[in-house]
């Protein structure tokens, strides 16, 4: 502490030399201390504003990777790195101010050590070196210190950009502690400390006003970012509490029922109600060709199977948090999942039954490039959609010296079902119907170039429909509402996800990197126009495999693709795609033969494998 107190003692001595008064030297000391800490206060203000400026991107990351804490941390770290922002940059000024505060109090508590020529410590007849208990009148100083700190907290809560976004307890939780500390500490120390603290708080108000004027949040930050999030009502809190109690009761009942059956189960695990469509072909085959019972575990309390499930399928609700422990203590023979990265994040292989065979089934038919590295490494078996997945997985095992998995040639059930439902004789529309249906990842069409695409299409006679990805509407409701309001009178808005008529009755699909492109093309045999936005790459080391991602290959085989800086060419390309249906139909049929296992029979392929394993 001497490294701090000795220089600070010189400041106090300089003040005494200038004023000849102990009290005025304390005022001088407080003034100089605020000048010293002003750059730190400016740094904190600037840092708070910088954080608010990137807050929309932070929110985007959280919504995009909701439930995946590891991915969120990784993406936020990359964002901080790109924006030259460090979360610790707010900590260093605070630590520096804390050390300075301790040093200042140490100097003021022992004035005779730092002021050898000090004759007395009186100021306006009050001995500032006395403790508060020795001079009842000086109880006023702790009170003034506390009140001045209260005034400082009011100013900071109204001006500081970070604190303006906080709700009541966020603002006042620490403030109440500081006010209490400001009143208590001068009470148990010398009167000089209370005198210093009172004047320092008043100067702190001036510093807050100065930093706010130099880095004004009103000019540097969007107004909506300075407003606290909406406060939940009492009724909302009661409803949420009731809902949680009901879900907890349902969860306990389901888990009890699950464990009441035998341990050698065939289990399907689903993270949402919408995932059944990826299992349906296999499940329906197993139920109709065997006497097996399927145990269907879902994280979604609104999963339709919980209230209406087919014979010999038992559905159980296990919430996302409880699922961590549930999966760790699971006993079964086979577990089928679409969730990736088993054993790497929150979902682990069971330690209660190490003989379980874990089967991964794809919910798309593209490449490992769209999955995180190691996504299928800890599965025993993978139901592959096409030969490209076998090549990629075997190459990964070779490259990283992994144990070989069982790779079963299954196909893609979702496509099989859609093909059956699709009316091949629906014909074409007049005028031609064009659907814009992008992904929800960063740089998707809605976020990057929707206005120009629609403007170019308006040059022709087309029926234009825009349809959001369900995740886009869920994660970015404000953005979607703005798009709806902007185009409600000029194009058709389709957000009826219970039907897919607009998709499979459209003459042309425009998308970015959404896998809907391949479902559409393989089902309808009609072409796709791809806009080359930033590719969604989850596995940054995919290039090490030395294999071109199927996502890239298929763009050349099932339609045309165009860069964002050439969108003016859209009318000509659309016209060419619509006028040559036979050309693209043959190319698409060739892609199906080349890249897809068992078209129309994926349920049989996957179901027969599971039946054989369960009966072995």
Image: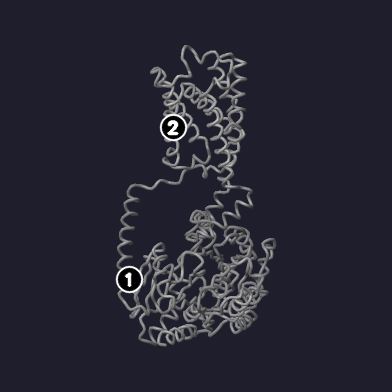
Report the residue at 33% width, 65% height from top: 251
Which quadrant holds the N terminus?
A: top right
Q: Which residue is mark 2?
A: 181
Report the residue at 60% width, 70% height from top: 369
Compute the Cα span from label 2 to label 1. Answer: 57 Å
Residue 519: image x %, image y %?
54, 75
Residue 36: image x %, image y %?
61, 30
Which quadrant of the figure has residue 582?
bottom right
Which quadrant of the figure has residue 587?
bottom right
Residue 265: image x %, image y %?
38, 79
Q: Indicate which label's residue lies in the foreground, 2 or 1.
A: 2
In the image, residue 39 sits, relative to residue 297, either above or below, namely above
In the image, residue 405 sits, relative to residue 140, either above or below, namely below
* Secondary structure at numbered mark 2: helix
Q: Report crowding for label 2: few under 14, some 14 to 19, many 20 or more residues within 10 A (C-alpha).
A: some
Residue 485: image x %, image y %?
51, 55
Q: Earlier in the sequence, mark 2 or mark 1?
A: 2
Q: Nearer the viewer, residue 513 or 106?
A: 106
Which quadrant holds the C terminus?
A: bottom left
Q: Which residue is mark 1?
A: 307
């Amino acid at each position: 502490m001497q490294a701090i107190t000795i220089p600070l003692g010189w400041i106090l001595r300089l003040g005494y030399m200038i004023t000849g008064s102990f009290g005025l030297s304390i005022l001088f000391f407080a003034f100089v201390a605020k000048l010293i800490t002003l750059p730190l206060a400016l740094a904190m203000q600037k840092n708070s504003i910088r954080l608010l400026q990137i807050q929309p991107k932070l929110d985007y990351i959280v919504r995009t990777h909701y439930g995946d804490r590891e991915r969120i941390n990784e993406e936020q770290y990359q964002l901080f790195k790109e924006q030259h922002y460090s979360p610790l940059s707010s900590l260093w000024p605070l630590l520096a101010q804390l050390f300075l505060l301790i040093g200042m109090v140490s100097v003021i508590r022992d004035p005779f050590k730092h002021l050898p020529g000090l004759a007395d410590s009186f100021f306006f007849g009050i001995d500032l070196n006395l403790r508060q208990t020795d001079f009842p009148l000086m109880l006023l100083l702790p009170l003034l210190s506390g009140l001045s700190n209260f005034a400082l907290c009011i100013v900071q809560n109204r001006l500081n950009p970070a604190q303006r976004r906080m709700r009541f307890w966020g603002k006042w939780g620490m403030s109440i502690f500081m006010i209490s500390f400001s009143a208590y500490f001068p009470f148990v120390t010398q009167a000089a400390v209370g005198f210093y603290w009172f004047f320092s708080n008043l100067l702190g108000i001036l510093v807050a006003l100065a930093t706010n004027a130099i880095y004004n949040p009103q000019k540097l930050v969007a107004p909506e970012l300075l407003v606290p999030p909406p406060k939940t009502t009492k009724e909302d809190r009661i409803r949420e509490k009731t809902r949680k109690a009901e879900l907890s009761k349902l969860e306990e009942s389901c888990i009890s029922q699950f464990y009441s059956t035998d341990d050698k189960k065939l289990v399907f695990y689903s993270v949402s109600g919408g995932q059944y469509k990826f299992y349906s072909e296999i499940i329906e085959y197993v139920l109709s060709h065997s006497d097996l019972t399927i145990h269907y575990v879902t994280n979604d309390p609104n999963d339709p199977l919980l209230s209406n499930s087919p014979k010999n399928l038992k559905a159980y609700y296990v919430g996302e948090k409880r699922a961590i422990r549930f999966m760790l203590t699971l006993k079964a023979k086979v577990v089928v999942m679409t969730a990736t990265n088993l054993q790497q994040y929150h979902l682990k292989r069971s330690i209660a039954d190490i003989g379980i065979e874990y089967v991964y089934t794809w919910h798309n038919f593209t490449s490992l490039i769209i999955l995180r590295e190691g996504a299928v490494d800890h599965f025993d078996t993978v139901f592959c959609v096409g030969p490209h997945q076998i090549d990629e997985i075997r190459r990964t095992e070779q490259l990283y010296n992994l144990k070989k998995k069982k790779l079963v040639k299954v196909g893609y059930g979702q496509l099989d079902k859609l093909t059956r439902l699709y009316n091949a004789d629906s014909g074409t529309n007049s005028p031609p119907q064009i659907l814009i249906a992008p992904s929800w990842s960063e740089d998707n069409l809605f976020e990057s170039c929707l206005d120009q695409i629609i403007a170019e299409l308006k040059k022709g006679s087309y029926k234009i429909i825009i349809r959001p990805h369900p995740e886009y509407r869920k994660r970015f409701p404000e953005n979607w509402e703005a798009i709806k309001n902007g185009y409600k009178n000029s194009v058709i808005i389709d957000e009826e996800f219970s039907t897919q008529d607009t998709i499979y009755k459209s003459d042309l699909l425009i998308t970015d990197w959404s896998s809907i492109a391949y479902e559409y093309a393989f089902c309808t045999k009609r072409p796709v126009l791809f806009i080359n936005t930033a590719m969604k790459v989850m596995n940054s080391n995919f290039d090490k495999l030395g294999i071109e991602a199927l996502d890239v290959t298929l763009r050349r085989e099932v339609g045309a693709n165009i860069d964002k800086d050439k969108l003016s060419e859209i009318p000509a390309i659309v016209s060419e795609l619509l006028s040559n249906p036979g050309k693209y139909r043959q190319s698409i049929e060739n892609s199906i033969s080349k890249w897809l296992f068992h078209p129309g029979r994926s349920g049989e392929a996957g179901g027969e494998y599971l039946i054989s394993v369960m009966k072995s």
